[in-house]
Amino acid sequence: MGRGLSLSFDLDGTLTELSFADGIWLEAIPSLVAKHKGISISSARQRCVSAYRRVGDASIRWYQLSYWLESFDLSDIDPETLISEYTHRISLFTDVLPVLGFLRSHGHDLYIFSNASRTFLDREVSYCGLSSYFQKIISLPDDWSMVKSQPDSYRKLWHAVGHEVIHVGDHLAFDCEIPRSIGMHAYHLWRGQGPRRDDSLSSLDEFAHRITGDRQVR
């Protein structure tokens, strides 16, 4: 595709594994709910997951930890303290740093374009040492009051960068189908979970090959 392209990446499930985020949503919060309500962890987890599903991941509230703490009557819990207890769970997929370095060496500008709130995003980027690879790191809920379920979020990204952007991420609808619906180049990265397409990629090495034409990424 040439040099000097702008490439945007999803974060959770694309660059970072889900053990950190899942630890907050499926372990930490249910544990707090169980203690607050005097119910079992299993019942609390079911209650939390049902509440998450009612809101749905197309809503900005899905990504806002403060909203969920208030919703579960846990407003006295400090989000930063809660996040800190699970920071050790943060980890990158093994293909991330080699591919980011490779793409930067080919003159491409890189962006993080994520539905994660700043509370999560900044902690993950800092812990993994990612900031030096990226021109800009965008938390859609906090920076733009949007989420990727809205096609206009990709139009705004295009406008913010000033020219065409190529996106990659692990959510089939939000990272692939929605940007493609507005004429944007986008790739679905299948990390072994959820639905996939015939043209889904199985690694970031494949994405780098599509961008540069070079099969020798590492």
Image (cartoon, rainbow, N blue to C red):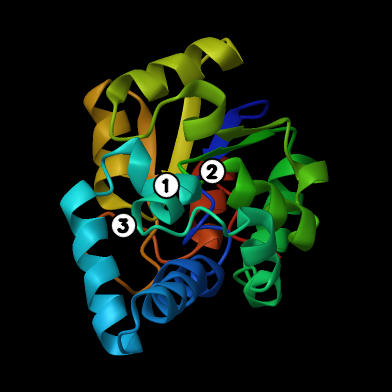
Residue drawn 67% across the image and 73% down it: 85
Residue drawn 19% across the image and 65% down it: 50
Q: Give the mark, 3 or 1, whose residue is nearer the N terminus.
A: 1
Residue labelled with disc 3: 200
Residue labelled with disc 1: 63
Residue type at mark 2 is Ser
Q: Say whether residue 209 is left or right of residue 121.
A: left
Q: CA distance from mark 3 to mark 1?
A: 25 Å
Q: Where does the image place residue 194, in percent across and percent down from the top left?
A: 25, 67
Callout 2 crowding tier (Cα within 10 Å): few <14, some 14–19, many ≥20: some
Q: Secondary structure at mark 1?
A: helix
Q: Give the mark, 3 or 2, whose residue is nearer the N terminus.
A: 2
Q: Say whether residue 198 is left or right of residue 156.
A: left
Q: CA distance from mark 1 to mark 2?
A: 6 Å
Residue type at mark 3 is Ser
Closer to the camera in the image, 139 or 54: 54
Residue labelled with disc 2: 117
- Any part of residue 197 in sight: no
